[in-house]
Amino acid sequence: MSWLEVSFEIPKMLSEKCSEQLEQLGAVSVSFFDAGETPILEPRPGETPLWNKVKIVGLFEDNITINAVHEALSDFLPNTPLQISPLADQEWTRTWLEHFHPMQFGQNLWIVPSDTVLPEEKNAAIVTLDPGLAFGTGTHPTTALCLSWLDAHPPKDEVIIDYGCGSGILGIAALKLGAKQVWAVDYDPQALIASAENAARNSLSAEQLITIQPQELPGSVKAQTILANILAEPLIKLAPHLKEYCAEGGNIVLSGLLTKQLDAVKAAYSPWFLFEIPKTQEDWVLLVGTKVNN
């Protein structure tokens, strides 16, 4: 598959807004650069771009048009020049791997790139990962929040749904922490391919991590935990759908939402779930609820 890289320069204060707009437009990843061309890719936990002038780069499938990007940004960047250039699969994957290093979440969970010396921790649950062209390495606060929650609440013998699985990182982490089976769900075929490849890389079978598109997910599946690290708008729309797949007394773990979006997302799920106090990292929120009503 061919991809298009859309890049432009913005003031630091608009970084978050532009990133959100590009993701809503369909960007599979958003990266930040300073004037010296030092990439940080997804900001690491606790990091935000510090430069006054930021170069933002979005990666899209090759059917995106410059007019669509201009329209999405027109309200706050009406005259910003955009650069669009093609990018090959191999080139993008190599860029990810150059900036992806071993990371620890909580007490026992580690995410490490392939061909890395593994940490010598007695009880370590180690996920070996190559992200490919699917989102999710653990560096973004939304993913980091989910991984830390999984480490603190090991899903022993549970059936898990990873809705919007991306690279498969959350589902694979759940299996490494004791889950019985994971349904990895995504509309994007590239995400399902990346998830299956990463599962195999971690010596997990196709019966342990099942990759599937949303419309194919059997109605009979009842998960003890549903993980959904996607954007606020689809989370809200999916509420009546996801509650059907959650077992009575099970958990729903929602991420990918900003603090300003918390109330709207919580309201969408409140008829069926009782929520804990949200956890935050930077402006991102992790919302965890227990199913109390059908």
Image (cartoon, helix red, strand yellow):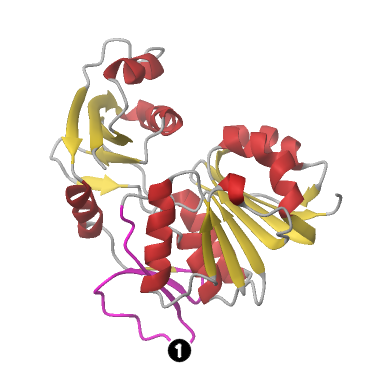
Of residues 147 and 85, the one nearer the viewer is: 85
Instruction: Report the residue at 73% width, 36% height from top.
Output: 268
Horizontally, is 37 left or right of 282 in the view? left
Horizontally, is 107 left or right of 218 in the view? left
Q: Which residue is mark 1?
A: 122
Horizontally, is 257 left or right of 237 in the view? left
Quadrant for residue 13, please give it. top left
Residue 46 in view, yes or no: no
Quadrant for residue 201, please give it. bottom left
SS class, disc 1: loop
Q: What kind of secondary structure does the magenta stretch mostly adopt?
A: loop
Category of crowding for the residue at label 1, using alpha-carbon neighbours closer than 10 angstroms: few (below 14), some (14–19), many (at least 20):
few
Q: Position of residue 266 (x, y in %)?
A: 71, 40
For this orientation, the residue located farthest to the left is 36
With respect to residue 151, does 72 lie above or below?
above
Q: Position of residue 223 (x, y in %)?
A: 70, 61
Magenta residues, as a range? Answer: 105-132
Q: Position of residue 207 (x, y in %)?
A: 54, 71
Of residues 67 and 144, the one nearer the viewer is: 67
Query: Which corner quadrant holds the N terminus?
Result: top left
With respect to residue 67, does 46 lie above or below?
below
Instruction: Report the residue at 18% width, 34% height from top.
Output: 86
Quadrant for residue 169, please give it. bottom left
Instruction: Report the residue at 46% width, 59% height from top.
Output: 168
Q: Position of residue 139 (x, y in %)?
A: 38, 55
Residue 242 in view, yes or no: yes
Q: Amino acid at mark 1?
A: Lys
Instruction: Report the residue at 85% width, 54% height from top.
Output: 292
Question: Is residue 191 rendered magenta in the image?
Answer: no
Of residues 194 and 215, the one nearer the viewer is: 215
With respect to residue 105, does 164 lie above or below?
above
